[in-house]
Image: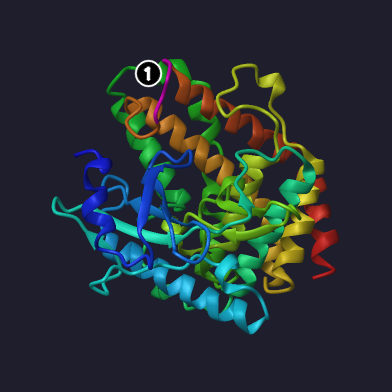
């Protein structure tokens, strides 16, 4: 695919940004889409900025469905934020359509581009440097659930089919083990047995969904701290970004992915497993904040299943790393041999730590859930 920079002139001329464009440079630390910050210069005021992105054709095969999801959700969020007296221009992304009125612009080689206003006065953190920051992200993602509780989740497209289908992830792992195309099974028998011994766990949330115990909701599906824009002055979450993976799903999975990512202090590929553990204090901080943000919008069953969200998202991620290691590191980028196996091992250690402290996790959820 041609460099995104080669299309900037063509693409920017297709959007009416209400002022001359004076610059566009690469922006952020994302590895999926090509992202630029665009500077415009209105005559009567200071520079106004926008985010311009070329959506990855490798990750997202149907940009029409992707943008239909995003426009539907952001429009709904904007109305709800306005109804509650909030600032729609800062608290929800807004899709700026090209001059054609289409949901996105298609360049001369088929690339799909979109534009959002830049949310000024915010900062994006790559890791939770303090418990307060982690809590702020929890309130923001809880609020995301509350604001979207009335959105018809089943109308959303699955932009990545079966993304959090843990049963399917286990099936893919079994297939990779059976094929063993690179002869790697012998070096990771312990990790394979760990996953297979938890086969019943892989159906817990999905079975609860099938039985109607857990409702289908609008879920973000990538609830890392760096997908929350924080107010520079207050440190509170302002706006949820990176909505490419917004799909129908389970609220407990959004909660769980945040815990997997943020409630520990180790690198994802840490080789010294003695350094890997669940920080229960951070679990407590995030649980309290997430439920505060949700403000009673979750059902009692959803609250009770929150520890399962943490365990299953961690288990699923470990299975994905292990499967990728067995098939030759085709999905997750590696910088050294065996990195995906090391990533799998950290997830296994976190799962085991959660299991060992399960009663404590349930007690924390019960404590804060009682006040929602």
In percent of width and height, residue 122 lies at 62, 53
For the record, the magenta segment spans: 333-337
| Along the line of sight, the residue nearer the viewer: 325 or 101 | 101
Image color mode: rainbow
Which residue matches tag 1?
184
Q: Picture quarter containing residue 58?
A: top left
Residue 80 percent location from the top left of the image: 59, 79
Position of the C terminus by quadrant? bottom right
Q: Does 361 sit above or below residue 300?
A: above
On screen, residue 190 versus residue 336, left or right, reads right
Examine the image and state in which quarter residue 175 appears: top left
**Could you tell whether 289 is left or right of 94 in the image?**
right
Question: Which residue: 72% across, 54% down?
Answer: 136
- Mark 1 Cα shell of 10 Å, populated few (<14), some (14-19), many (≥20): some
The location of residue 35, given as percent across then percent down, is 39, 46
Q: Is residue 190 above or below residue 133?
A: above
For the stretch drawn in magenta, the main secondary structure is loop
Quadrant of the image containing the N terminus: top left
**Can you give x and y, in whole percent of width and height, for residue 352 in the image?**
67, 34
Image point 42% across, 74% down: which residue?
72
Outermost residue, left side = 108
């Amino acid at each position: 695919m041609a460099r995104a920079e080669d299309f900037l002139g063509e693409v920017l001329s297709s959007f009416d940004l209400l002022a001359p464009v004076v610059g566009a440079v690469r922006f952020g630390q994302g590895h999926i889409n090509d992202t630029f910050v665009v500077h415009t210069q209105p005559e009567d005021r200071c520079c106004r900025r926008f985010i311009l992105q070329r959506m990855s054709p490798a990750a997202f095969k149907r940009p029409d469905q992707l943008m239909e999801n995003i426009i539907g959700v952001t429009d709904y969020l904007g109305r709800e934020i306005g109804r509650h007296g909030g600032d729609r221009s800062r608290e929800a992304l807004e899709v700026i359509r090209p001059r054609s009125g289409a949901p996105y612009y298609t360049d001369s080689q088929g690339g799909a581009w979109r534009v959002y206003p830049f949310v000024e006065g915010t900062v994006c953190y790559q890791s939770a440097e303090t418990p307060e920051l982690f809590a702020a992200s929890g309130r923001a993602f809880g609020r995301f659930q509350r604001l979207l509780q009335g959105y018809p989740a089943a109308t959303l497209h699955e932009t990545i089919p079966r993304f959090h289908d843990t049963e399917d992830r286990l099936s893919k792992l079994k297939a990779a083990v059976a094929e063993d195309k690179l002869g790697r099974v012998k070096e990771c028998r312990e990790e394979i047995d760990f996953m297979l011994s938890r086969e019943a766990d892989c159906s817990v949330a999905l079975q609860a969904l099938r039985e109607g115990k857990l409702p289908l909701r609008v879920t973000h599906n990538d609830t890392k701290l760096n997908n929350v824009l924080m107010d520079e002055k207050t440190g509170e979450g302002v706006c949820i970004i990176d909505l490419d993976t917004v799909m129908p799903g389970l609220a407990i999975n959004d909660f769980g992915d945040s815990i997997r990512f943020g409630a520990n202090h180790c690198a994802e590929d840490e080789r010294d497993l003695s350094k890997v553990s669940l920080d229960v204090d951070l679990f407590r901080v995030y649980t309290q904040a997430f439920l505060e943000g949700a403000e009673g919008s979750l059902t009692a069953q959803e609250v009770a299943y929150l520890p399962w969200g943490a365990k299953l998202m961690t288990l699923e991620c470990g299975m994905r790393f292990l499967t990728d290691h067995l098939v030759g590191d085709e999905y997750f980028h590696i910088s050294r041999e065996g990195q995906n196996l090391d990533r799998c091992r950290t997830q296994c250690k976190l799962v085991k730590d959660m299991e060992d402290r399960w009663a404590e996790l349930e007690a924390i959820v019960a404590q804060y859930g009682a006040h929602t």
